[in-house]
Structure formats: C-alpha cells, structure tokens
Image (tube, coloured by chain):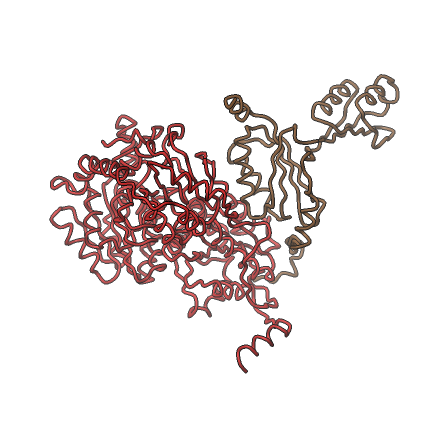
Chain colours: A red, B brown
Amino acid sequence: MDTAQEEATTLTEPKKTVSVSGSVALLEGLIAEGTDTIFGYPGGAIMPIYDAIYDYKDKLKHILVRHEQGGTHAGQGYARTSGKVGVVFATSGPGATNLVTGLADAQIDSTPMVCITGQVYAHLLGTDAFQETDVINITTPVTKWNYQITDANEIPAVLAKAFYIARSGRPGPVLIDITKNAQLQMFDYAGYVPCDHVRSYRPKPNVRKEYIEAAAALINSAKKPFILFGQGVSLGFAEQEFKAFVEKSGIPAAWTILGAGAIPTDHPLNVGMLGMHGNYGPNVQTNSCDVLIAIGMRFDDRVTGRLDKYAKQAKVIHLDIDPAEIDKNVKADVPVWGDCKETLPLLTALVEEKKHTEWLAEFRAFDKTEQEVVIETELNPGQGELTMGEVINQLNILTKGEAIIVTDVGQHQMVACRYAKFNHTRSNVTSGGLGTMGFGLPAAIGAKFGAPDRTVVAVIGDGGFQMTLQELGTIMQSGIDVKIMILNNRFLGMVRQWQQLFHEKRYSFVDITSPDFVKLADSYYIAGKRVSEREDLVSSLEEMLNHKGSFLLEVMVAQEHNVFPMVPQGSSVSEIRLK
Amino acid sequence: MSNSQDIEINEKQEFTITVYTENQIGLLNRIAIIFSRRKINIDSLNTSPSEIEHIHRFNIVINETEDVVRKLARQIEKQVEVLKVYFNTNEDIIWQEMALYKVPTDTIAELVSVERLLRENGARAVVIRKDYTVFETTGHREETDKLIEVLQPFGLIEFVRSARVAIIKNSDGFNRKLREFERREPGQDVIENEFLDAEKNVFSM
C-alpha cells in the first residue's frame, strides 16, 4: 500500500484508539512535541509518570537533578541555548514549591518551559493530604498559563495547549499539575494532536503597516538614530532579519544583557551594553540620540535608570510582540506591534541605506575614554590581585568567542556580560530580570544538554555557587562536560560594592566564607584547580578548556574590586560614573 | 491645553473595567492578582456568565488614573483566557447596584413616615413576613447608601449590596460579535474535579 492510500484510509476511518494510562499519554505527547531531555526529580505524587518513563528511556533522556530549583534552571538553560521548550518534572508539595524561583525567572526572562507537577489524588484535594500544596495558585503569578488535570482524558489536549502557549508569542513558563489518579487512569487515547490555536489567545498582534511606515519615516529623517535591542530578537529567531536592518540603516546598536550575542560582539555597528553597568557611550548617547529604536526589549529599570530623565529628547519607536510592553515604562511615539521576524524585514525594506559615520564616531570617542579609564586597568592590570575582567578577557582569547557563557548573578555577571565575546546567538545564558543567585550552575547543565556540541563555561561567584552547588551531583551522574569557573572574591561582591559606595562602607553580612571548592569538586569526581597568580592564569584556563569532561577552576580575584562604569540607582543614564 | 489634559489623565477617578473571558477555574485569581500585585483595591467586582454560552463577563470597579488603568487593562488582556478588555469612566456607562434591606415588619406597618421614605427612595418590597420585610432598591452607591441612613433608626436588621453592573454606552455590535465568535469557534465546558466525593471510585495505592 502506498503512502497516499494509507493516508486516505486513516482519514476516512474513524480514529483508532488505544487504551493507555495518563502517564503514557503524557510521555507520548512530550515525544510528539520534540522533547528529548527532561530535568526532574521523582516523588510520591508523580510516581506513575516515573514508572512510565522507565519504559521510555530510549526516547526520553531524564536528568536527575539534585533539587527541583536546579531542574527549572537547567530547563531554562536548555531552552535558551536550544531554542526549544525546557521540560521539568517535579512531585507535589515541596517538589512543586521548589519550582517557584525558576518559574519566576523564566516568566520575567520570557523563557519557554513546560513544568509537570504531580499532585495528590483528586479526591484528596483540599484535605491537607500528605505533600499537598495548592501549586496552581502558588504559581499563578509566575506562569504564563497553568492548569490542573484531574482526568486522564484531558492530558493530550492540555499538554498540546501548554507547549503552544509556552513557545508562541512572548514565550514563558507553563505549569501542568496532574493528580495521581489521572496519571494512573487508563483511557482511550486517540493520538496526539499538536495545538496551533487557542481562541482567546492572540500570540502576536497584527502588524500595522501605517506604523511601519511612520517608523521608517522617522528613521529616515533621523540624524542620530540609536538602536536598543533585547532578547526579543533571539526569542523571535530574527537574528538575520535584525542584522539586515542594522546593516542597511547603518545605525549603532546597543544591547540589554539578554540581547547580547544576537549580533556578534565584534560587529562594527555593535556599540555595546546598556544599563547600570553597561558601556559609557550607549548610556550617555541614549540622552543625545534623536530617534530611539527599541527592539524586543522592555525598558527595565536597570537599563533606563531614572525614567523622567531618560531619552526625553528622542522620538521613541518600540517594536514588541507583547502589547502590554508598549508605553509600560517609556512612552512610544511609534509603536510597532508584532513579531520582529515579520516587522523587521518590512522596516528594512523602507529604510534608506545610510552610514552614520560621524554619529558612530561619537560612540567610538566614548569607547576611547572608557577604554582608558576603566577597561585597560580592568583587563590588563599587570600587577596586584587578579581582576574578574582579565579572567574573562583571557577566556575570550582562548575560546575565540565560540563558547556559551553561563553566568550567575552579581559582579562576575556584569563583568562577564561586559567583556565576554559572542560570535553566535544563544550563547549568553544569564538571569536578567529576576537576578537569581544560584542560577548559573544548573543553567549551565541545561545549556550543555541544549547545545551538546558547544563549549559551555559557567562563570559563577563564590556566593551564588553555594546556593546550588548540589548540582555538582547532577554533573557527576550525567557525565556531561561543563567548565565551571568560580570567581572567588570572598565577598558577596555586588552588595559589598553598594555598601561601599552608598552605605559608608558598612559591610553588613557580605563577607562569606567558602569550602575548599577544588576538594568539593574532587569529592564529586570532578577535576579542579585553584589559581591565584597571574602567571598561572592562562595555563589554568587552558587546562580547564582542554580537559576532557567537567572541570572546576577556582580563580582567586581581588576582594574589593568594583564594577564600573555604573549608573547609580536613581540617576539618569547620562550621569554614568566611570569610577 | 496639553497641560490640562495631563492633569486629567493623572487624576484618580472611578473606572469600570469590563472583561470578557473564558469560563475557566483559576482565572478569577489570575485577574485579581493583577490588581493586588500593585496594591490596588478593587472597589467592586461582579463576575457572571454573559449572554453567550461559555463566555463570562467581569465588571471591576477601581479608583485610579487613566494611565494606570490602561496598563492594567493590557495586563489583563494578556492573560491567555481573556477575550477582550474595555475600561470606561462613569460618563461612558450606565450602571446600577442592587441593595436588599431587612427591617422589622411592625415598624414599617405602624409608621406612616417609614412607608413614605421607602416610596421616596424607590424601594420595593420583595418579601413581607410577620416578623420582617425585605426591601430592594437599585441605583448608584449614594442612593443605596441613603436608604441605609433612612432605615437605620427604624431597626434595620440586615443589609447587603451587589457589585456594580454596567452597560457601556458605546457598545454597538458587542452582542453580535460575541454570538458570531461563539458560533465560529464554540467554547469548551469547564472541567471540574469529579472525584471529591468519589473516594471509593478512585484507584489508589
């Protein structure tokens, strides 16, 4: 029988069903959605699903994390590097509540995830049963959508809806809570039908041509146009479209930390990082440009500084897929609603080909000042204690911008984002909106599973590392290759920096002691090394990168070193301090 | 001119937010937390099925500036199961609240003045029993408030008031569009937990 005939018969015949458990239907659905890796932790209320996955080991890789929070961050890392949906399993009660931090992080950073939690039997709901918690209501503020399933018949359609919602429009985390009876229940399964439509949900607004035209007119008349781009570019898989727009218009472009890498760091029109610890030029020039073109970014307060002194002189064009972002923080003169993969080519077609040579030279002049006052001493101190900047710089030289850099949160994060070189998109994995300490190590695990052929370097502080260091166990057991670089300044450095600058150096609970990280790694059978001398730095980095398998490199860096430039909280971006 | 507009837009006033939604468990919470997250009090909340099967309608009253209300409306509309959000000032709507008053029947029966007051306030008797009588009025908040004051000296036993329901003056086509929407893509019935009292029917181990 040929394929056409086969199709004809399946279309005309009534749909065949097979009797399967809710758990099996769930796993079949995950496979149909292209899931290959699940980060999870079993427990009482999710046992039927774990029983089913025992027979699916050849199709679904399950990574046993050491804490459910680690599972969510791994799911995020996976989603960020692969462009796919991260999938996480957890049991009810404490398993589910441990997901909250990762869900909140994924929600604010628009990371597509589907989290499955087990729940007590439906008849026990509301009885304070063992490990019962109201996970739907706990996670409502930190999910794009969530749903509780009490009957196995709901599973295929709800899972399909979950994946569709998680990855479409502005992506985000979705949680499905499945009662144990529904996991066990046998029902007539008619196969998996992916979802491509929810009647009450508009993933993206319609593109309005008049606004594209208005935006193009404004850009074409601008003398000093300036592009700000965020993660929207890579979330929309629109890197090529974005590059074409930037290159044709000749407009200098600066990035938010989640936007880093959407065009290569070395691109001549990439003028650097925005925000509190961003580059000098981009911050100052925000307040001297005449047209500000914001693409897939949301004007976070860490990017804008004081809002009433933010780009007041400029006309603002805002491209975003989420209508709620338009006018939320900064009023847009021309709102361009839509998916930037669609809107950018329309805009590129209408903008004139230009080279803003003089305007770009202004940026380069600021770069020169920043280079002299900040960067040179940070990257090439020559003497004294090691700086975080020189470690990142040496790493750049060795990886040539090819590595995925995962960071935790704090000083090292700002330094890594400022100085890391990215040749490729989806190479910078960091916790931007939520600022979750402890994100780095588990996210790096997920990042590696999402991009197994690439080098993954996790840059983590001594504080954040101690929040989720149990995930070393996950690295040990799964046998993956993650390079862990702890920049140890024996302080909670960013808080210390603020206490120094704004609290009269009253160092309140920021001196943190650490275990012997190298011995710790060793007890997890992970190779490691500590380096504190400049002459050993490059060889140590080489050893880490060349090592087959995971490696932990602890770098002892200057204790009281500050990240500059800095836009102090409550200041305008143009009041950025160089020291 | 632009200055006076700014002031107007930045002044707090009553807004009625009308939300058309799916009938979905948990959606009430999802909408409510958009307000509570920003520490905004909901003055009045009414939710009930609309005239179209599967579609529910919320009426939410808050006291805020137009700028804030516009942002709230966008956040509400962003929720997956929300179909459409409108927000209106009191000038844009016709609204009513309903109030019930329970008073001792003997007072009403004996005092002519009370009967007159009730008539003046447009109250209608819903139930008359030997021991008590329940009156009903509909109107704006001030009107239903006024009758409380009037009845207080005459032994008011119990009082209750509904949330605001509001009709938008400029709502041409609402019903037609909703009917068309539901006809084109029928909504789904809400699935409730059927096992709460069915312990024996649930497999457990």
Between B196 and A138, the one lying in front of the other is A138
Q: Is residue A78 above or below residue B88?
A: below
Work out which residue is located at the far bottom of the displayed protein and give it: A1
Identify whether A398 is placed above or below A433: below
Report whether residue A98 is seen: no
> Residue A130: image x %, image y %?
53, 52
Q: Percent from the top left, x then y, of residue A567?
A: 31, 32
**Residue shown at 76%/22% (left/top)?**
B147
Q: Seen in the image, is A101 located left or right of residue B58? A: left
Quarter of the picture containing the C terminus of chain B is: bottom right
Q: Nearer the viewer, residue A484 or A145?
A: A145
- Tell whether A274 sits left or right of A321: left
Residue at x-position 34% and y-position 31%: A287
Q: Residue at 55% across / 33% down in the picture?
A: B69
Residue at horizontal 55 percent and vertical 24 percent from the top? B8
In this picture, residue B111 sits left or right of residue A151: right
Give coordinates of residue B30: x percent, y percent.
56, 43
Give percent across and percent down for residue A201: 56, 50
Quarter-of-image position of residue A37: bottom left
Q: Is residue B46 left or right of residue A511?
A: right
**Above or below, B26 relative to A194:** above
| Number of numbered labels in the structure image | 0
Residue A171 visible: yes
